[in-house]
Image: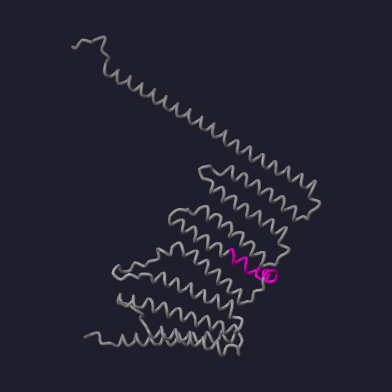
Amino acid sequence: MKPIDDNETPDDFTDELDDITEDVEEEDFDIDIEIKRKRRSRMKRKRTSGKEYGTLASFIVWMGFTVVWLFFFAGGYAFIQNLAVIGIALLVIGAFNSIAWIPSHEGMKTKASALSGIGWIVFLILWIVFYAGGFGFYENIGVALASLLFVGLVNAMLWIPSAGEDGNARISAFGAITWCIFIVLWLPFANNVASTIYYFTFNQNIAIILGSFLVMTMMVIAPWFGKMQISVNEAISVGTKPKGTVALFWAWLIVLVLWLWFMADSFSGNQNVAAALFSFAILCLIIMAMWLPWARKRGEGPESWFSIGLSFGWVLLLTIWFWFFADQFDGYQNFAVFLISLLVAAGIAAGAQWRKYREFEALDWED
């Protein structure tokens, strides 16, 4: 038998003691976690209670304002105006609470977007109640759409980054949305401008719209103009052809704007349509002549010269019709002539393709 040493602790007792120590340490750790959680919960409740008290106080202020307005001021206004004032005050309170309740980690952009939406509703209420009566239906629709587009523009500028290629996207978005705002305001208010500032003819109005479209496309495309490239074959580069195509399109728009502004009033509407068609045909010829050598270098080209020639012949036929004969008929008759000529041209092109397909099938493939 092995003698027992009083100074020596048995192994089983040591293991049991270690287990008890570990359990106590784990319980202490759990208690610390629970204490910290309760502290955070109390701190969170304190912060949240401040927001809740602020929200409650804001609605009490709104109710007080409503009572004061109804008692002292409402008698001098119509029912709809008083309703608008009370509704706007409620929206202001809503804006205050939106700022208070949107989490700070969402950032100022989220709060600004929420405020822009509430501000748009306030503007609509003010416009409808106090100013809409002095304008027509389409003018009021234009103002509503323009204000909504303006809110979209503000949010686009907020959320689209301003650096790098995203900065180019911001410029493009600004140009496109600004043009839409101009169009929805110009179309209903053009007559007002013509009667108060300068009289614009119908053709000059079309020129203004086309000119604004030209400016918009320049703003949208200009940031990307230097990067316009088509990577098809490194050995056969397109060079500056994409840029040249866009430049030719801009030049065609400029020619149309100048024609409509200075010369269109000397001709009939049908003759102006003919001039536009003829100029478009010339534009397509120039662009095609610019791209054809590159296509031939790649061993490609138009699949059907007959169809292309037929298309140009159809455009020239319409040009002759609208310039020399269309004024003798009304709009419906001219539109009927357009449809008939389109159907005839499409039928001829389809017949030529079908004949080509049948000849291809008739070949002796067994040999």
Nearer to us in this view, 129 or 56 = 129
Nearer to us in this view, 196 or 89 = 196
- The location of residue 204, given as percent across then percent down, is 61, 75
Image: magenta residue range: 181-197
Nearer to us in this view, 122 or 36 = 122
Chief secondary structure of the magenta portion: helix
Query: What residue lies at 59% left-to-right and 74% top-to-bottom?
Result: 206
Identify whether 127 is placed above or below 115. Answer: below
Query: What residue lies at 30% left-to-right and 76% top-to-bottom?
Result: 297
Q: How is the image coloured?
A: one colour
Query: What residue lies at 56% left-to-right and 82% top-to-bottom?
Result: 272
Q: Quadrant of residue 148?
A: bottom right
Is residue 188 part of the magenta span, yes or no? yes
Point out the image quarter for the N terminus: top left
Q: Quadrant of residue 99?
A: top right
Point out the image quarter for the C terminus: bottom left
